[in-house]
Image: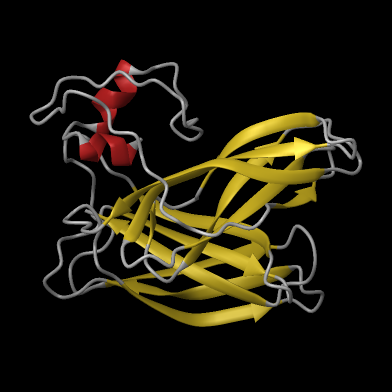
Amino acid sequence: MLGIALRYGILLEDLLAANPEVDPRFLSIDTVLIIPPGEETPVALVTPTPPPLDLDDPVCYPTADGGAWCFLLVENDQPYALENISAWIGIYDLEGENVGGEVGITPLNLLPPDRSMPVVASFPPPLPERFTASSDRFSAFGVPDTGDRYLETRLTIDQVEISENGLQASLGGSVRLPARSPAAKLVWLLGVAYDAEGNVIGVRRWETGEIAGNGDAEAVIEGGDSLPFSFDVFSLGPAIERVDVLVEARP
């Protein structure tokens, strides 16, 4: 919902207050939102137009309690960034009957050009012991210019240690802002684990800071400074072959 608030020139807190029954983490594509008055509120809500991307079927991993996690990898081959990415993911039994559906979202808001990030959906139990998954209703905003909503960063990875059994990867490094950059009040890092076949097998988001509507949030990185990080990513399936890291910083 942050991207919608920014697009309409209103505070995220005002948008959340106007829609108390809407879960901002799991926005469905057909959700109707009340847009409170803002300085530049358009007359009608603009529907996101999906860019022409090739998407494979989701890859799902059963959980111990009988549910599942599903990942739909989005590869941004457009010359611009994508924002507010979501897709409906359906679960089907071996007879083709739909037994579950969830709207998945990406762990970060922004996907830069020539980068990949999975849409993630969690399914509660019970599910069939064997099932298939497919995706539908993919949605995203094209962002030719991110303006001052996202900050330029330099990501340095100093450590990628994969455990002997391949089920855990330890990551470490730092995020740096350019010398003349505004301070960052929110920094998110995403570790995406892949198997030898290139399938997503695990994700982990590391975050620090917050964005306060009244502007009182404290900075977590000043311009010219670095922020160290370390976190682990775990596999839900096969052994980890490699890990990709993405970063998102906002003022």
x 50%, y 65%: residue: 116
Above-or-below relation of 127 to 151: above
* Left or right: 76 as drawn, with respect to 225: right
Above-or-below relation of 87 to 157: above
x 20%, y 58%: residue: 145
Of residues 54 and 158, the one nearer the viewer is 54
x 69%, y 45%: residue: 134
Q: Position of residue 120 (x, y in %)?
A: 59, 48
For the N terminus, give its image quadrant. Answer: top left
Of residues 249 and 86, the one nearer the viewer is 86
In the image, farthest residue toward the bottom: 158
* Left or right: 155 as drawn, with respect to 146: right
Q: Position of residue 39 (x, y in %)?
A: 8, 29
Q: Quadrant of residue 229?
A: bottom left
Above-or-below relation of 86 to 225: above
Q: Position of residue 49 (x, y in %)?
A: 37, 43
* Left or right: 3 as drawn, with respect to 159: left
Q: How many marks?
A: 0
* Colour setup of the view: secondary structure
